[in-house]
Image (cartoon, helix red, strand yellow):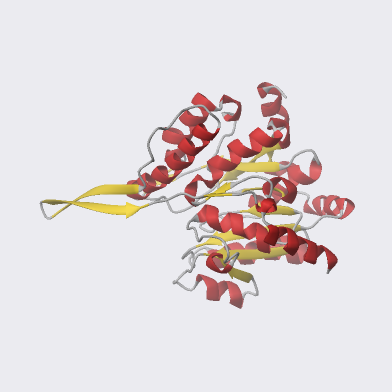
Amino acid sequence: MEFSQWLRERTFDHRDFMNISELVKLKEQQDCTISLCLPTLNEVKTVPQILTTIRSSLVDEYPLLDEIVLIDSRSEDGTVEVAQELGIKVFFDDEILPSQKQGKGKGEALWKSLFVLKGDIIIWIDSDIKNIHPRFVYGLVGPLLANPQIGFVKGFYQRPITFKKAVKETGGGRVTEILVRPFLNMFYPELAGFIQPLAGEYGGRREVLDSVPFFTGYGVETGLLVDIWKKYGLSRMAQSDLEKRVHHNQSLGALGKMSFGIMQTIYSLLEENKKVEIKDDLNKIFQTVRYENHNYSLLSEKIEVIKRPPMASLEEYISHRQRLEKS
């Protein structure tokens, strides 16, 4: 599929799927199940509203979702307790697949979620959305149900940013614009049409998601884009306009650490795809210079990205899925 054709035929709008009852009919016709997963770490301020809004609309009113699950990374602010009080299943990422070397970060939680989620279609949304609306879910489910050829859907939206208590309607997604978009344009121009490559709202069919590797940490989105494209091509990928997403904007220091992890993913992809040759091991220590009380100090933190194998390659996963199918 040519790039211009892809952009025209594989870019959707959540408004195309506002008739949720029609989506439920498509789901029933295709005899498939849909899981929603939220990776969480200390998001008690936003998680209750997200869970109640989505469950009310897409479980109680319209049976579009078959399960809603939290994969938690040991929150300490009450996130887990609130979710459990609402009757939501919670799994801790460090308790899933204990036979595997333990990793950290968002990508670890998403990879392990494939093991515990039951759905044929899996949707992930971030747990810090302040303007939650059902469109963040049905806008992603819609293209998958409407076109069986599509195996992966990425959300995009306007991203306001708060600066000195003033809200600007655009300007969010700073790591996207200064790191990931230039990287895709330089080495993978076929993927340059994805408007929000780092968006945390996306999903796909199980047989697509469990067949590709996952990077731990914040490199997971970049890795999935490249690896799904390599394995399946653009024709099986799509994006959907979810309108606007409001969340807590991270500090420049936090974005620096995020970028450091994403860069590890980028160099791993480039070397694997024989686009560059890396002769030395990459440094995993991120150092930040701090200035306080007229003194400079150096803070060091190890940030290591692990590449997880395709979930479908694990014997534990294969056996687990076989047991589920028989039950």
Residue 152 percent coordinates (x, y): 69, 42
Observer-nearest residue: 323 or 10?
A: 323
Q: Is residue 155 left or right of residue 285?
A: right
Residue lying at the far front of the rendered structure: 279
Residue 218 percent coordinates (x, y): 48, 48
Q: How many marks?
A: 0
Residue lying at the far left of the rendered structure: 294
- Going 35% across and 43% down the picture, which residue do you hit? 283
- Going 64% across and 63% down the picture, which residue do you hit? 53
Q: Check the picture and name the quadrant holding the N terminus.
A: top right
Q: Is residue 166 above or below residue 108?
A: above
Taking the image as drawn, is residue 172 in sight?
no
Residue 94 percent coordinates (x, y): 53, 66
Taking the image as drawn, is residue 117 in sight?
yes
Observer-nearest residue: 143 or 130?
A: 143
Observer-nearest residue: 282 or 113?
A: 282
- Going 65% across and 34% down the picture, which residue do you hit? 229
- Going 67% across and 28% down the picture, which residue do you hit? 7
Residue 40 percent coordinates (x, y): 52, 62
Residue lying at the far right of the rendered structure: 29
Q: Check the picture and name the quadrant holding the C terminus.
A: bottom right
Observer-nearest residue: 86 or 16?
A: 86
